Amino acid sequence: MTVGEISRLTGVTVRTLHHYDQIGLVVPVERTDAGYRLYGAAEIERLQEVLFLREIGFGLAEIESIVGDAAYDRETALRAQRRMLETKAEHLLAMIETIDAAIHARGKHEAMSGDEMLGVFGDFDPAGYEQEAEERWGDLDAFVESRRRTSGYTRDDWKAIQGDAAAIDQAFIELMDAGTPPDSPEAAEVVARHRAHITKWFYDCTPEIHAGLGQMYIADQRFTDNIDKARTGLAAYMSEAIGAVVARG
């Protein structure tokens, strides 16, 4: 058989077969007058052994040592290779079963895809801030707790979260429209709802954390822009209202 024929049958590239020849691993039985390599039954058998050993993880130097050993017995080697492949197959099947179980579990929880999450949050994608959040707050218990909770939320959970948040935003907007000062008792009641919302769905929102969130709403333009989509000035109003509540203790 020629190099090209073996390449088509095995999927091994011609370049690889040439390399095996150069290093003496699988040497053709002869060459034609035109210089083409030709392989006989023994060489094809040798190539099969090499490919088996490569498949189960041996390097070329190790393979050369194995098949070049005078005590090398093909049948014994094939039986050993079969046992290794059986072990590998068992491992792969166990991995497949684990993956299937994970898929089933997520299916039961109706976990949201990225597209579905964007559908709930509009064009604001929380996942886009995940790496930054982990870098800034990854060692905080609140971040760890939020990640633990949200990983198990269903599509309906996320819709409920969005609905609650929208209702709180609307309450703030109504106060703004009525000219109610952000340090008023009415605003303080909505601030309490806001803090309770975070505690219910994400993590224990302490007054200190809440104050930090309020400051971030105006310090980080991305958050300001997103909040102000509901009403211009909403981020500043919320920030001032939260700050007033925290200041009063």
Image (spheres, rainbow, N blue to C red):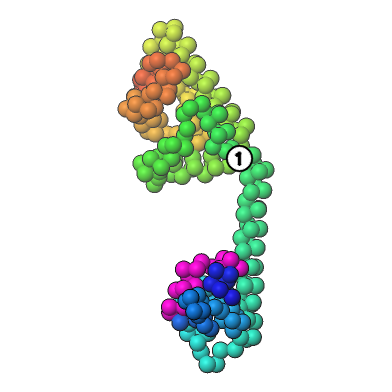
Q: Quadrant of residue 247?
A: top left
Q: Is residue 32 left or right of residue 100?
A: left
In the picture as drawn, the residue positioned furthest to the front comes out as: 33
Residue 17 included in the magenta stretch of the image: yes
What stretch of residues is rendered in magenta? 7-23
Left or right of 113 in this view: 180: left
x and y percentages locating residue 79 in the rendered image = 64, 82
Q: Is residue 132 above or below residue 102?
A: above
Q: Nearer the viewer, residue 31 or 130?
A: 31
Three-letter amino acid code of the residue under disc 1:
Ala
Q: Is residue 241 visible?
A: no
Is 51 on the left or on the right of 110, as rendered? left
Residue at image position (52%, 83%) is 30
The residue at the far top in this view is 178
Instruction: Please report the residue visible at 57 percent of the width from the left and 38 percent of the height from the top.
Output: 113
Query: Which residue corresponds to mark 1?
Result: 111
